[in-house]
Amino acid sequence: MTHVSGGQPTERSIEASYQNSFGRIAGYLPADRAVVHAWLDEIGRAVERKRAQNALVRHDSVAGLARLIDRDPVTRMYVSLMIEQARDRWKGGVRDIPDLLDHLDTIVTWAPRYTDKIHFPMSALFVYMMYTPAGLAIFRDRGLNQALVGILREWCTYLDSPASRDVLTADQWLSQSAREELKLDDFEIDFTLPYGGLASFNDFFHREIKPDRRPIAGGADPRIIVAPNDGRVVKIQGNVRRTDEFWIKGQRYSLHDMLDGSDLTTGFVGGDVYQSFLAGSDYHRWRAPVSGTVISARVVEGLTFTELESAGFDPDAGTQSQIYEASVNARALIFIQSADPIGVVCVMPVGITEISSLTIGVTPGQQVNKGDELGRFSYGGSSMVLVFQPGAVAAFDVPDNKTGNMEKGQWCAVNSQIAHTG
């Protein structure tokens, strides 16, 4: 919970809550809060210009949030308090509920630019609100979350449209600096064509990788387990429990909550969990870590803008939030029946912050080979969890991240070896 002095947050507590935020730790938001302030000023000016031109359009999803706030006095109270408390932290933010709705209407048709210092607009918009006492409560409310998911989906629809590819240019996401930073030559992009031959911003975000850039470790050897995604190791934990206090500091995975009460949960008790984090620039498609038969595949509707609370600066806050989010956030559950001794493996992509879509590309009964595509994320931050039954993994071949710092975990390429069975 945020510390206050004389009823007001101190500069020290504001800085601590910001530096503890998942967006900051994950690199979605800059270390310098002044950069966030400058971006908020920019989008505020964009809102004002639209108001002056009578050009603001109330999108269906934002109208849905407006109706929720209007008809539910408790939601209206918390949202109003959240905005007021956030303005105690920085005066240049959203002024009131109508202003918040206008900002969201602007973001719904906002394609991030490479040259922007803020690539995740809703994370920046909400960063002060999320860490107020009212924000910590209301962002866990299912009704508000459902409304936010609707906004994220409408934004995703825009990012799926040709209108969003105006930022796929030689001075933005296809620039030489972006090409080097994001290793774009590893991907199926034709730089000789307009927009790189891509249909939309999301087409760029979940771009296809050239097969020779991510070879499948061990080939068809069933003993080798491969990474389902590009990403850094967050945590490897053995002897996981059916239920645990995932909201308590201590790196606890709770299988019943993670697997949404699945009938298959019992088989994973005492097994192993491998979790990795995908940065915004990572490859955002998911691959099969083992060969086998898909026995179940579904999306669990969960939270989006919420994370574990920390008092004061906590260098472990990002890892703690990743583990918490594995139990409560939007996620896909794909269960694959592999040959013994591996047995059933659960592949669990987790949506975080600006995740608009988890798209599953396989169906129950389908045979998959190690390295086959299972699905993809659309624009946003994300995490990946693998859950193994007891005895399936003889040893992990990548080190556990014991630093508490997500950015210091070992980076693993999709299809690289992360573990082996006996």
Image (cartoon, rainbow, N blue to C red):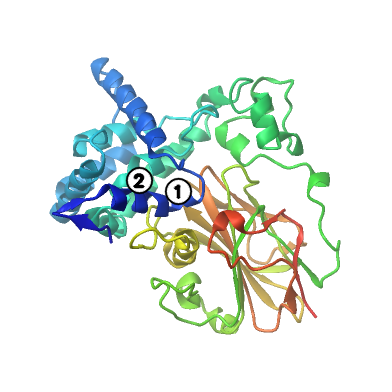
Residue density around tag 1, few if under 14, some if 14–19, many if 20 or more, within 10 Å: many
Residue 283 spot, x, y in % from top left:
65, 46
Residue 100 spot, x, y in % from top left:
26, 37
Residue 95 spot, x, y in % from top left:
20, 35
Residue 357 spot, x, y in % from top left:
50, 48
The amino acid type, in three-letter code, at marker 1 is Gly
Q: Quadrant of the N terminus?
A: bottom left
Circle 1 is placed at which residue position?
Answer: 23
> Quick one: SS at disc 1?
helix
Marks 2 and 1, how far apart at CA: 8 Å
Considering only vertical position in the picture, is 404 above or below 75? below
Circle 2 is placed at which residue position?
Answer: 127
Task: Decide if residue 341 is in sight here.
Answer: yes
Q: Which residue corresponds to the image point at 47% horizontal and 60% vertical from the top-left?
A: 315
Considering only vertical position in the picture, is 190 above or below 127? above
Q: Earlier in the sequence, mark 2 or mark 1?
A: 1
The picture quadrant where one finds residue 280 is top right
Q: Quadrant of the C terminus?
A: bottom right
What is the number of callouts on the image? 2
Labelled pair 2, 1 in contact (Cβ < 8 Å): yes
